[in-house]
Amino acid sequence: MLSSFQQTCTKLGFLEGDHHWHDTTTEASQVKMPSQLRKLSLVICAFGEVEWFNVCYPKEQDPVKQLYNDLKFKAVTAEQLKGRAILIVTNDLSIELNNAVLNLTPGREEVCDSIDCILSEDPQDQLSYPEKFLNSLTPTGMPPHKLRLKKVADIMLLRNLMPSKGLCNGTRLIVTKLQRNVIEAEMIGSSSKETFLIPRIPLIP
């Protein structure tokens, strides 16, 4: 008679060792749906080693603290940010979490304001869609009107700038220097350590 669910799985050949048990529960916490996680938790509590429960339900519920608590933002590198990301379903929540991460970053903040306008030259359209109203919108694939930035901030490209160099829509970079109309940044996940210049560009949703 085996004393735990973990020992039973190991005996049956389902687990290669303690590291496999840990990797399995960690992966489940990242990819499973809530209903599946609840079932997994019941199995672990009933038959397993309960010390693994905090893998699926960590004490720290703040996603920003979960992901970045071990970093020193003053000297963070692109390599340290590799593999760290929070998936968000709405633009508003994305902006809120981005600002929360930015607040953890020391240094001077720069705010880049967008210049919003409509393409129509019809005077009636100009009256219907004033600049103040356009500034309040954040369509999918567009940055907020007031984009807050700091050195070592984690940013993402929203357009294909230089695909041959890997600068494509969705590419993540870390800011190395902020200029008036240009952002100097290093690509996250690249071994070249090459610095790229990201200019202000027109965006149409």
Image: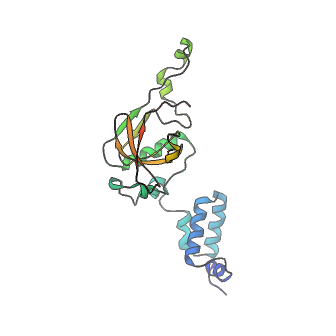
Depth order, front residue of 77/199: 199
Say which quarter of the image contains residue 99: top left
Camera-side residue: 142 or 95?
A: 142
Find the residue positioned furthest to the top: 123
Q: Is residue 132 above or below residue 47?
A: above
Q: Is residue 79 above or below residue 102?
A: below
Percent position (x, y) of residue 83?
50, 57
Q: From what the image shows, is residue 116 above or below residue 46?
A: above
**Count of numbered marks:** 0
The percent position of residue 71, horizontal first and vertical second, equals 38, 58
Give the quadrant of the N terminus: bottom right
Residue 175 in picture, x, y percent from top left: 39, 46
Q: Nearer the viewer, residue 13 or 60?
A: 13
Colour treatment of the image: rainbow
Q: Which quadrant: the C terminus?
A: top right
Q: Residue furthest right?
A: 12
Determine the residue positioned at 48% across, 48% down: 172
Question: Residue reaching furthest front?
Answer: 164
Question: In the picture provided, is 52 more to the left or to the right than 73?
Answer: right
Res 24 → quadrant:
bottom right
- Drawn side of residue 167 relative to residue 15, left or right: left
Q: Residue at x 34, y 44 (%)?
A: 177
Q: Residue furthest left?
A: 108
Within the image, what quadrant is residue 191 found in? bottom left
Question: With respect to residue 180, does 185 lie above or below?
Answer: below
Q: Residue at x 48, y 54 (%)?
A: 63
Residue 85 in the image: state x and y as whole percent.
50, 53
